[in-house]
């Protein structure tokens, strides 16, 4: 009796399980296949350049007079107009130079006195009609006086410059004050009051005292690889991203591409370990900085230059592609036993992530994500 009861319970359980099994529809295997949709999109092929933001025009301030920095009239960041005084230099001649300058003045004065005496003697003879006015020695003596006067003037001007830094030559006034050659911003001041400086007339490199630039005209300078340089031409659109403002993209245009390349990782002109990368310098201008953006010279920046672009075209992710040799195709889900069919496609522009589909697919069509399902190449 007990065995019959157990057997009946098992039979009822199996019948119930079978009923529910038959009532549940078979799982749609196609629903488990990862799919993508052909979407309308925008594809850009770009070149990347790395560089920095710099003024288009900058100058270095140097002194034509050797001496000591006596006054500094403007500091870093100040805006100055052309002709504004920047530095006052106090001459600091060596004892030898000062002695030589004083000696030159005395020598020139003695030469002038001698020439003047000779001229006065001959002038007296002309006045007494002893010799004519066109007498050769008289004309020569007058010339010697003028030459001696000019020489003395020059020696005195040189002594004035050595002693005080100020002198006058004709209508021109020579001064130890250095004036701004352009209107712009002081980028940096590289000397201190009391510091000795080397002039541009020295055999040594002249001391750079200050750098100035017009910050209203800012450009990007950087380099691109030789592969990108081959496709660049002035006028191409570009977008800049500054290191301090990574969230801001600034519109600009390519201005120059270097004709001569540079070896980016070369040392003293020689490639290291036999490897090198030919880099081509570029300039980007017409940069439309937002007014709220505070830009400083030397900011690191990355430029993205648009080589080609297409808009409102069918696009798919590159990971969905299958290749038979060089022929691309995609997998389209269907009701076949394999669950998909192979569809050849013709591709257009690619940005490395998405690719334009020229033929073979239409917008909104579903395709399989072959990278997720591990489908074999067709």
Image (cartoon, rainbow, N blue to C red):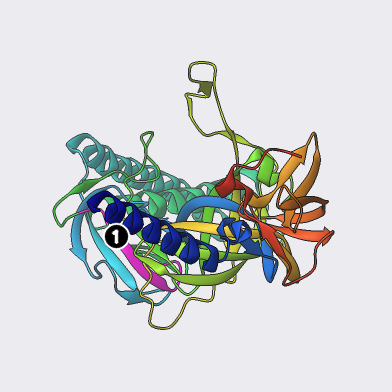
Q: Position of residue 183 (x, y in %)?
A: 44, 74
Residue drawn at the location 65% of the way across and 45% of the way down: 136
Q: Is residue 154 left or right of residue 335?
A: left
Region of the chain picked out in magenta, as a range? 180-191
Image-based side of 105 in relation to 222, left or right = left
Q: Position of residue 106 (x, y in %)?
A: 29, 44
The residue that appears at 26% across and 66% down in the rendered structure is 76
Residue 114 versus residue 353: which sits nearer the camera? 353
The reply to whether residue 233 is visible in this rendering is no
Disc 1 on helix, strand or loop? strand
Q: Is residue 314 visible?
A: yes
Q: Quadrant of the C terminus?
A: top right
Q: Is residue 189 a member of the stretch shown in magenta? A: yes
- Residue 72 locus on image (x, y percent): 21, 65
- In the rendered image, residue 173 lying in the magenta stretch gets the answer no
Q: Nearer the viewer, residue 328 or 45?
A: 328
Seen as rendered, the residue at the extreme front is 1
The answer to which image quadrant residue 353 occupies is bottom right
Left or right of 197? Residue 217 is: right
At a point 40% along the width and 48% down the height, the residue shown is 112
């Amino acid at each position: 009796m007990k065995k019959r009861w157990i057997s009946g319970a098992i039979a009822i359980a199996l019948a119930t399980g079978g009923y529910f099994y038959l009532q549940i529809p078979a799982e749609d295997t196609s629903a488990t296949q990862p799919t993508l949709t052909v979407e309308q999109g925008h594809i850009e092929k770009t070149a990347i350049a790395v560089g920095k933001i710099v003024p288009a025009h900058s100058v270095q301030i140097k002194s034509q007079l050797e001496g000591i920095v006596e006054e500094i009239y403007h500091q870093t960041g100040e805006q100055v107009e052309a002709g504004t005084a920047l530095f006052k230099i106090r001459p600091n001649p060596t004892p030898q130079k000062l002695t030589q300058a004083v000696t030159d003045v005395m020598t020139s004065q003695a030469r002038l006195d001698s020439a003047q005496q000779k001229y006065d003697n001959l002038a007296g003879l002309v006045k007494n009609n002893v010799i004519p006015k066109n007498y050769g020695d008289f004309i020569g003596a007058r010339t010697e006086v003028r030459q001696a006067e000019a020489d003395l003037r020059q020696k005195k001007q040189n002594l004035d410059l050595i002693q005080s830094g100020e002198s006058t030559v004709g209508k021109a006034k020579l001064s130890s004050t250095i004036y701004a050659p352009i209107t712009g911003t002081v980028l940096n001041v590289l000397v201190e009051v009391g510091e000795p400086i080397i002039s541009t007339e020295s055999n040594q490199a002249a001391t750079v005292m200050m750098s100035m630039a017009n910050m209203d005209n800012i450009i990007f300078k950087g380099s691109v690889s030789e592969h990108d340089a081959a496709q660049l031409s002035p006028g191409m659109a570009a977008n800049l991203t500054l290191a301090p403002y990574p969230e801001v993209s600034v519109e600009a245009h390519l201005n120059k591409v270097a004709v001569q390349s540079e070896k980016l990782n070369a040392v003293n002109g020689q490639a290291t370990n036999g490897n090198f990368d030919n880099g081509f310098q570029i300039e980007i201008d017409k940069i439309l900085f937002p007014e709220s953006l505070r830009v400083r010279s030397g900011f690191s920046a990355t430029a993205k230059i648009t080589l080609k672009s297409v808009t409102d075209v069918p696009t798919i992710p590159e990971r969905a592609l299958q290749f038979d040799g060089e022929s691309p195709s995609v997998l389209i889900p269907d009701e076949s036993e394999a669950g998909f069919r192979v569809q050849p496609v013709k591709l257009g522009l690619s940005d490395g992530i998405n690719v334009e589909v020229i033929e073979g697919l239409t917008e909104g069509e579903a395709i399989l994500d072959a990278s997720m399902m591990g489908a074999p190449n067709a």
